[in-house]
Image (cartoon, coloured by chain):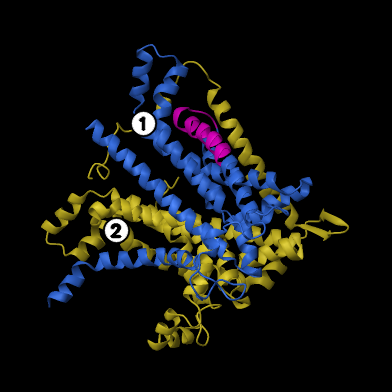
């Protein structure tokens, strides 16, 4: 039975590709339905092809405003979490100090906590302090939950770094600042970049914590949430598709650049 | 083409750098830690204290709340909402098992069988992250629509009869049933299973497979005795990364479910943001946290992997 044998040998490939299809199916639907012209308020059923939404991506009230708020928050949260997280990662790998265990668990716990618990408890803090909910409370919350992910990403990279490289720089009379800028930072850069990228994605897409702490500020995920109740404009799919394509393009270009660099080195 | 997939030359294993402490800057680590740790203390740890205190307060929105050590709130909350608690744990467990079953073959495929396609498949696993997960979850409304091809196929294959009998679906639809919610949870957290699995599978030395084959192990035996045990760290962190967020999620239940599929996250959200019953909401959130931390601790102990961070 050659067919059965072939199936047996490739079973894992078939199952893997099935999972990949499961992962990508919603993105296909989002893309296809960005060309839809729905009848009612909801864009869940295919009617007919139209480019209307792509021609007027900001044609829906408040959507592009919420997108810009989300982008601003994501940029600042990435910046804040990356700086603070990188500092912690370096301290954890390079130095010996007290309360190491407590600090490690303080960094691990936010990642092991259901988001709704962090969201609810942060809201009790803000309510008790009488803080005005809005842009700043969202930003504070986003820096908080992105921080741990940056620490983990940077720590992994710095730990795998050969300490002799820095010793060599010092032996060659580089000062501490010069050593850091010329040797340490470039080697740690991929870890820092990975942490920053992750922060941006997490912050931009966060819904649960934002939902609790946003007050009347509307981020893009909150706009989508609201539209799931009121009616989903096609433009949401346009934004989703554009983001997906941009991400793939970004990765492909950066892969090409690394590829070329590696060839030059070889 | 192969340059990208080749591993960089291994760097020397990290010696604990603290063994060669710098002479200057005894306080440097503290300055480095201070801002970030302070941030976590004030905006992560302190809120938990506030939440604990809120949960034992009584009062009303108009007159304000006072700490009265009213522990009955916990009892009331549990006796009223235990079905939602139980449901959350069941849905999360179901989604975690499905993620493992679906994610393992794909992680295995990327690690051992993808060859030159490895990078492309990796990108395809990660890229959906960049489309807002709410938009992608809404797409499931289209996919599982009542008159859509999938429900039609399930119906003609009599799968729905089986799931109806199990209580996972009701009538001729999938939307607004537990199956839809678990399907959405599985979809949303699948990458969190695949990535740690892939990381631990990729570390396995391919020669171990050859050795097993040379010792007359069949492929399935090789998998059971060599590959799977070596991938345990990935399995443990993958299951945690799926189970924890799934247990607290309320998005999938709200968008794909019905009032009969409400999870504990939905209850906490409604209590906090609509009913404004802060003590009950805080107590529920505290119970959820305690339950999850207890389960995670036991799980990590039993599986013997402590190095998750």
Residue under the image location 24 percent in, 52 percent down: B116
Residue under the image location 44 percent in, 88 percent down: B161
Q: Quadrant of the N terminus of chain B?
A: top left
Residue A133 in view, yes or no: yes
Residue under the image location 27 percent in, 54 percent down: B117
Q: Please provide percent x and percent y for residue B282.
A: 70, 58
Please report the bounds of the magenta region as a residue range: A78-98
Q: Which mark is residue B108?
A: 2
Secondary structure at numbered mark 2 = helix
In the shown orientation, is residue A35 left or right of residue B202?
right
Q: Which mark is residue A35?
A: none
Q: Residues within 10 Å of mark 2 (few under 14, many from 20)?
A: many
Q: CA distance from mark 2 to mark 1?
A: 28 Å
Q: Please provide percent x and percent y for residue B107.
A: 33, 58
Q: Which chain is yellow?
A: B
Reply above or below: B52 against A7.
above
Reply above or below: A18 against B47.
below
Front-most of residues B51 and B8: B8
The answer to which image quadrant residue B41 occupies is top right
Chain A, chosen colour in render: blue
Reply above or below: A251 against A187.
below
Badge 1 is on which residue? A161
Secondary structure at numbered mark 1 = loop
Q: Please provide percent x and percent y for residue B200.
A: 33, 51
């Amino acid at each position: 039975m050659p067919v059965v044998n072939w199936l047996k040998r490739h079973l894992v490939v078939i199952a893997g590709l099935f999972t990949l299809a499961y992962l990508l199916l919603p993105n296909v639907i989002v893309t296809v339905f960005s060309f839809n012209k729905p009848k009612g308020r909801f864009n869940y059923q295919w009617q007919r092809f139209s480019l209307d939404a792509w021609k007027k991506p900001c044609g829906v009230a408040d959507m592009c405003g919420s997108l810009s708020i989300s982008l601003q928050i994501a940029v600042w949260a990435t910046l804040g979490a990356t700086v603070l997280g990188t500092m912690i990662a370096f301290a954890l790998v390079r130095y010996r100090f007290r309360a190491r265990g407590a600090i490690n668990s303080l960094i691990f716990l936010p990642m092991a906590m259901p988001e709704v618990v962090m969201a609810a408890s942060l809201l009790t803090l803000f309510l008790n302090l009488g803080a005005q909910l809005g842009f700043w409370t969202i930003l504070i919350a986003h820096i908080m939950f992105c921080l741990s992910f940056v620490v983990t990403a940077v720590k992994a990279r710095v730990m795998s770094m050969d300490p002799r490289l820095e010793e060599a720089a010092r032996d060659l009379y580089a000062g501490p600042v010069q050593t850091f800028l010329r040797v340490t930072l470039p080697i740690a850069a991929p870890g820092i970049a990975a942490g920053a990228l992750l922060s941006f994605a997490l912050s931009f897409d966060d819904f649960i914590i934002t939902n609790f702490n946003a007050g009347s500020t509307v981020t893009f995920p909150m706009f989508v949430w609201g539209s799931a109740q009121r009616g989903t404009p096609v433009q949401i799919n346009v934004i989703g598709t554009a983001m997906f394509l941009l991400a793939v393009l970004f990765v492909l270009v950066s892969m090409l650049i690394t590829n070329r660099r590696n060839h030059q080195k070889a | 083409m192969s340059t990208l997939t080749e591993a960089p030359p291994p760097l020397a294993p990290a010696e604990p750098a603290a063994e060669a402490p710098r002479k200057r800057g005894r306080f440097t680590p503290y300055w480095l830690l201070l801002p970030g740790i302070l941030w976590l203390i004030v905006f992560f740890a302190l809120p938990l204290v506030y939440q604990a205190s809120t949960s034992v307060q009584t009062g009303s929105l108009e007159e304000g709340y006072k700490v009265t050590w009213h522990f009955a709130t916990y009892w009331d909350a549990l006796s009223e909402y235990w079905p939602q608690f139980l449901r959350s744990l069941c849905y999360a467990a179901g989604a975690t098992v499905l993620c493992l079953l679906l994610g393992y073959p794909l992680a295995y495929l990327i690690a051992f069988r993808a060859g030159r396609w490895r990078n492309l498949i990796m990108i395809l696993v990660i890229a959906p992250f960049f489309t807002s997960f709410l938009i992608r979850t809404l797409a499931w409304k289209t996919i599982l629509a009542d008159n859509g091809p999938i429900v039609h196929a399930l119906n003609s294959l009599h799968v729905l009869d089986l799931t109806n009998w199990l209580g996972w679906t009701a009538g001729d639809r999938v939307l607004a049933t537990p199956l839809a919610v678990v399907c959405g949870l599985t979809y949303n957290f699948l990458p969190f299973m695949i990535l740690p699995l892939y990381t631990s599978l990729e570390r396995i030395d391919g020669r171990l497979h050859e050795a097993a084959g040379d010792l007359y192990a069949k492929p399935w035996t090789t998998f059971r005795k060599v590959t799977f045990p070596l991938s345990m760290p990935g399995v443990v962190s993958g299951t945690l990364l799926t189970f924890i967020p799934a247990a607290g999620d309320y998005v999938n239940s709200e968008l794909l479910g019905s009032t009969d599929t409400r999870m504990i996250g939905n209850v906490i959200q409604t209590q906090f943001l609509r009913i404004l019953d802060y003590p009950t909401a805080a107590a529920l959130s505290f119970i959820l946290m305690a339950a999850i931390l207890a389960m995670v601790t036991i799980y990590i102990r039993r599986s013997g992997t402590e190095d998750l961070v």
